[in-house]
Image (cartoon, grey):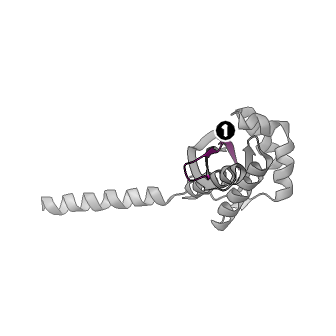
Amino acid sequence: MTKKIALSLVICAALCAAAAAAQAAIPKKGSVAIVVGGYDEQHILSVQAIFVRELRANDYKVVDEKKLAEMRRNEAARLALEGDVDAILRLRSKYKVDTVITANIEAGRPMLNPFDLFTGTASIVVWASSGANMIYGDTSFGKKVGYTPNEAAQKSVEAAASIAAEKLTL
């Protein structure tokens, strides 16, 4: 009898853990906006595109490209990237979104490796907030090789963005 109870408890714990793991990091209800910051416009646009593609593929309602571009030009977006909660709330209110995702890109200077190729590294810090609550935070890293410094940097940024977007929707 004791073995049956112990087995039942183990199965129950495993099912609870599976159910908790199956829940996405951000809620699927409502609209989602992505604000990306970094030093290179090409990196910013590619990271935003990767996030939008991954979120839409997982049935999230992402605001349209025109609204995302308008949000990016808003001063509150710059402040939101710095972690200003009031700015995030202003963005949510002005653009009528339920969840705001901020992503900050850091790409290191690609280095020439022994194979005469360039190795690029990048990190992306992602925060998601719904209401005044931070509901998700994570950092993802990418490391890729390219024939030129620009190619290595771009590939590493895209690799980090793909990992971050995938983790966000798990």
10 part of magenta stretch: no
Residue at the farthest left position: 1
The answer to whether residue 164 of the structure is visible from this angle is no
Give residue 125's position: percent from left, percent from top.
62, 42
Task: Determine whether, in the image, residue 52 is placed left or right of residue 160.
Answer: right
Q: Residue at x 59, y 54 (%)?
A: 144
Give residue 152's position: percent from left, percent from top.
66, 52
Q: Quadrant of residue 109?
A: top right
Q: Residue at x 45, y 55 (%)?
A: 20
Q: Which residue has dot 1 on it?
A: 132
Q: What is the span of residues highlighted in magenta in the rendered image? A: 97-117
Near mark 1 (Cα within 10 A), the count class, few <14, some 14-19 or many ≥20, is few
* Element class at badge 1: loop
> How many numbered marks does the figure carry?
1
Give residue 126's position: percent from left, percent from top.
63, 44
Q: Quadrant of residue 77?
A: top right
The answer to whether residue 70 of the structure is visible from this angle is yes
> Dividing the image into 4 quarters, which one contains the C terminus?
bottom right
Task: Determine whether, in the image, residue 170 is placed left or right of residue 120.
Answer: left
Q: Residue at x 61, y 53 (%)?
A: 117
Q: Quadrant of residue 132?
A: top right
109 part of magenta stretch: yes
Please name whichever residue, 134 or 142, is drawn nearer the observer in this view of the structure. Answer: 142
Please name whichever residue, 57 or 12, is drawn nearer the observer in this view of the structure. Answer: 57
- Is 169 drawn above or below residue 39 in the view shown? below
